[in-house]
Image (cartoon, rainbow, N blue to C red):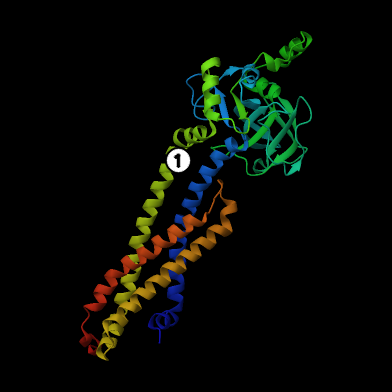
C-alpha cells in the first residue's frame, strides 16, 4: 500500500487546510511573478505598437520614454527626405488627469497625425479619429465607453470617445489615449485656441509652429536602420534611436527599479515558503514518530519510511502550488496591474517548489531515521 496516501486520507482535514494555507503563500509568489512580467509587457506595448524602426529625438537624448525630448515639428519632413526612409510620423507624449462623471481618470496621451505613423493599433470598438479636433481614442482599461465626453486641458475642452483599444497602457499602468497632433500640442505646449485661429488665418497650421517629442521612422524593405540612423544624426544633428535601443532604454531606465523591487519580494517569499514547508514537514514527521517506530519494529526498511516522508512533502508542495496557481488565474482580473502568467515562469517556479520540498524533507527524514523502534512499545 502507499503509506503516504493512506496517512493523508486518515488526516484528510489537516492535510487539506495545510495545503490550502501553503497554496495561498505560493499564490503570492506566482502573482509577484505575473506582476513582474505584466509590468515589463505593459511598458513595451506602446513603443512596439508604433511599428517603427527608428525614433528621432532631441540630440544626446535616449528617447521620449527615458528622458524628455523636444524637437521642431518640421523634423518629420526632414527625416522623410533621408534615403531609405519609407514613412514618418510626428508624435507627442504627455500624462493627463481628468474627471469623468465624478470618477478620476489618468491617461497617457499620444498625439499623432492621422494618416501617418503613431496612431492607435487595433480598435475593438468604435472607429479611429476622423475629425481634426475634439475626438479621442482610448484604451478600454480606462473604463470609458464610446460616446463619453472627456474634459482635458486648461480650457476644459471636451473630447468625444470615438474608439477603444484593449491592452494598451503606459509603463505606469495608465490607459493610453490618442488625440490628433494639433489637439495634443494644444494640451502639452499651451497652443491656445486663439493662436490656432490666428495661424489658420495666416495660412499655416498651428501644428507646424509647435514642437513635438519624437518622430517615428520606418525604413524601406532591405534598408539598414543603423545606416539611416547614422545619416539622420550626421545631417540633421539629432539622435536616432533604433527600436531595440528604445526598448532597452525603457527597460533599464524607466522600470528597472520596479523590476528589482518585485524580484526582491519574490526571493523573500520563496525563502519564507521554504522555511514554512520545512516546518510543516518536520512537524508532520514528529507527529508520526510512534507510527514510524512501529513500522521499524515490524521490519519496514528505511527506504519505505523515507519514501513516506518524501511523498507527503511532494504532495503538499505540488498540491499547494496547484491551489496557488488556480487562485491567481481565477482572480488576476481584479488586480490593479496586469498579471501575466507565462509558461516558462510557471515551469521554473514548479521546479523550485519541488526542489524546496525535497530539501525541506531532509529534517523530517533525519528525525525518522534516528527514531528508536522501542518507542513503539512505550506507554
Kindly tell me whether residue 34 is visible in this rendering: yes
- Left or right: residue 301 versus residue 39 is left
Q: Residues within 10 Å of mark 1 (few under 14, many from 20)?
A: few
Q: 129 above or below 352?
A: above
Residue 177, horizontal then vertical, whole percent: 66, 34
Secondary element under disc 1, as helix, strand or loop, is helix
- Left or right: residue 372 versus residue 44 is left
Residue depicted at x 36% and y 66%: 357
Residue 118, horizontal then vertical, whole percent: 65, 31
Residue 164, horizontal then vertical, whole percent: 71, 40
Q: 102 above or below 361?
A: above
Front residue of this view, candidates 279 and 315: 315
Front residue of this view, candidates 230 and 208: 230
- Quadrant location, the N terminus: bottom left
Residue named by callout 1: 258
Residue 79, horizontal then vertical, whole percent: 61, 20
- Quadrant location, the C terminus: bottom left
Query: In the rendered image, which quarter is residue 41 located in?
Result: top right
Residue extending farthest to the front is 222
Residue depicted at x 48% and y 56%: 344
Kindly tell me whether residue 154 is visible in this rendering: no
- Left or right: residue 343 versus residue 92 is left
Amino acid at each position: 500500500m502507499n503509506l503516504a496516501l493512506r496517512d493523508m486520507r486518515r488526516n484528510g482535514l489537516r492535510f487539506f487546510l495545510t495545503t490550502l494555507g501553503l497554496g495561498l503563500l505560493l499564490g503570492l509568489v506566482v502573482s509577484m511573478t505575473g506582476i513582474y512580467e505584466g509590468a515589463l509587457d505593459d511598458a513595451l506595448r506602446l513603443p512596439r505598437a508604433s511599428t517603427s524602426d527608428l525614433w528621432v529625438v532631441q540630440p544626446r537624448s535616449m528617447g521620449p520614454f527615458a528622458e524628455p525630448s523636444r524637437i521642431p515639428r518640421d523634423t518629420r519632413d526632414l527625416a522623410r527626405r533621408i534615403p531609405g526612409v519609407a514613412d514618418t510620423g510626428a508624435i507627442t507624449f504627455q500624462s493627463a488627469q481628468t474627471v469623468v462623471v465624478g470618477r478620476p481618470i489618468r491617461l497617457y496621451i499620444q498625439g499623432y497625425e492621422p494618416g501617418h505613423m503613431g496612431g492607435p493599433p487595433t480598435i475593438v470598438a468604435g472607429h479611429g479619429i476622423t475629425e481634426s479636433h475634439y475626438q479621442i481614442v482610448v484604451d478600454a482599461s480606462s473604463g470609458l465607453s464610446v460616446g463619453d465626453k472627456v474634459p482635458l486641458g486648461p480650457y476644459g475642452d471636451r473630447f468625444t470617445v470615438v474608439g477603444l483599444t484593449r491592452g494598451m497602457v503606459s509603463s505606469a499602468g495608465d490607459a493610453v489615449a490618442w488625440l490628433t497632433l494639433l489637439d495634443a500640442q494644444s494640451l502639452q505646449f499651451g497652443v491656445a485656441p486663439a493662436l490656432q485661429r490666428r495661424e489658420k488665418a495666416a495660412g499655416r497650421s498651428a501644428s507646424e509652429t509647435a514642437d513635438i517629442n519624437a518622430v517615428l521612422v520606418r525604413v524601406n524593405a532591405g534598408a539598414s536602420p543603423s545606416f539611416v540612423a547614422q545619416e539622420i544624426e550626421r545631417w540633421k544633428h539629432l539622435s536616432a534611436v533604433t527600436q531595440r535601443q528604445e526598448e532597452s532604454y525603457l527597460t533599464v531606465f524607466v522600470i528597472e527599479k520596479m523590476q528589482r523591487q518585485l524580484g526582491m519580494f519574490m526571493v523573500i517569499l520563496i525563502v519564507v515558503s521554504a522555511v514554512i514547508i520545512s516546518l510543516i514537514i518536520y512537524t508532520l514527521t514528529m507527529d508520526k514518530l510512534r507510527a514510524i517506530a512501529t513500522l521499524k519494529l515490524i521490519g519496514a526498511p528505511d527506504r519505505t519510511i523515507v519514501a513516506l516522508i518524501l511523498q507527503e512533502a511532494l504532495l503538499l508542495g505540488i498540491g499547494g502550488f496547484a491551489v496557488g496557481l488556480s487562485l491567481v488565474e481565477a482572480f488576476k482580473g481584479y488586480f490593479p496591474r496586469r498579471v501575466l502568467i507565462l509558461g516558462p515562469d510557471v515551469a521554473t517556479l514548479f521546479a523550485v517548489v519541488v526542489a524546496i520540498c525535497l530539501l525541506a524533507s531532509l529534517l523530517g527524514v533525519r528525525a525518522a531515521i534516528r527514531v528508536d523502534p522501542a518507542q513503539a512499545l512505550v506507554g
